[in-house]
Each structure stands twice: as C-alpha cells, then as structure tokens.
Image (tube, helix red, strand yellow):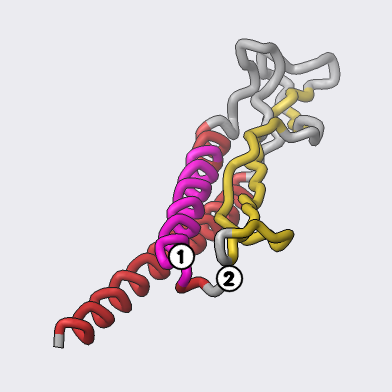
Amino acid sequence: MPIFDKPFSVLDISASGLTAERIKMGVIASNIANAQVSETQDGGPYKRKEVEFATVLSKSMIGGKSNNKMMLNGVKVNGVTESKLPPNMVHMPGHPQANKDGFVSMPNVSVAKEMVDMIAASRSYEANTSVISSFRKMSDRALNIIRR
C-alpha cells in the first residue's frame, strides 16, 4: 500500500515516535537523578531503568480486502524494566552502608552512558519533528497547487 493511500499515517508514525522518545528521555532523566541513591524503599541501591520499544504493525487493506502484508504503524513503549546488571561496588569506608571491607553498593547507572542515550533520544525526537514539519510543508504546497 503506497504511503499516499493513508497520508496521515505519516503523522501517526512520527507522533508515536515522539511519544516513545519522550518517555525514554523521562526514564533517562530519572536514571541520572538517582545515580547516587544507595538506599531505596525496596532496599539496596537504585537500579537503572531501561525502556523497551516495540513496532506497531497492522494488516494492510487493499481494495477493502485484508491481505497478509503487515504495515508499520509506528512504535510503542513495551515497558520500562530494571536493569539486570549488578550494582557498582564503590570503596567508601566511612559510609554508613559500607560493608566490612568498606564497599558500598551504588546504582548501576553510568551518567556518561545516560548522557549518550539522552543525546540519541533527543536526535530521534528532532528527526520525528522534522518529518512532521516536512509533511506539513508538503501538504501546504499541495493545497496551494490545487487552489490555483
């Protein structure tokens, strides 16, 4: 099915990308904010959160009949999970939560990695806004041509 059969699907796909990346940036911000939290309500250090994306597919309809071809309809957040990586052990002998060897269990969050992930999510967000902006400009030009 050509994209022009459902022109607003472009907007739907980009909007789903914007939503997913916004959620991812929120999770990254939470990871950064909790990068030094050594004790949570659940006990133990904060555990890094990860966002799982999934594609949204739908069966295409050609001539009113469903066929077996699947079309991409965007992306969705499948869930936010805790990282399975072990906590970082940091030597801080004077810390109240230090073990007998002077090590404290700290979050498994690397602020540098989170910043790289934030930049990637930000670029993806910008790309989706560019698609929406380009679609709007093309639609405006098409309407101007029709008006003449």
List x then y, in percent, for residue 117.
Answer: 59, 53
Q: Residue 1 carries which label?
A: 2
Give amino acid for label 2: Met
Disc on the earlier residue, 1 or 2: 2
Q: Is 87 placed left or right of 59 in the picture?
A: right
Q: Is 77 placed left or right of 33 in the picture?
A: right
Most foreground residue, 58 or 56: 58
- Report if residue 122 is visible in the image: no
Q: Is 63 placed left or right of 142 in the picture?
A: right
Residue 10 in the image: above or below residue 32: below
Most foreground residue, 7 or 97: 7
Q: Quadrant of residue 89?
A: top right
Residue at x-position 76% and y-position 30%: 87
| SS state under label 1 | loop
Question: Which class describes the residues within 10 Å of circle 1: few (<14), some (14-19), or many (20+)?
Answer: few
List x then y, in percent, for residue 138.
Answer: 32, 78
Most foreground residue, 112 or 50: 50
Label 1 belongs to which residue? Answer: 6
Most foreground residue, 21 or 26: 21
Give amino acid for label 1: Lys
Residue at x-position 51% and y-position 61%: 124
Residue 117 in the image: above or below residue 141: above
Span of residues in magenta:
5-27
Question: Which class describes the residues within 10 Å of circle 2: few (<14), some (14-19), or many (20+)?
Answer: few
List x then y, in percent, for residue 28.
Answer: 55, 42
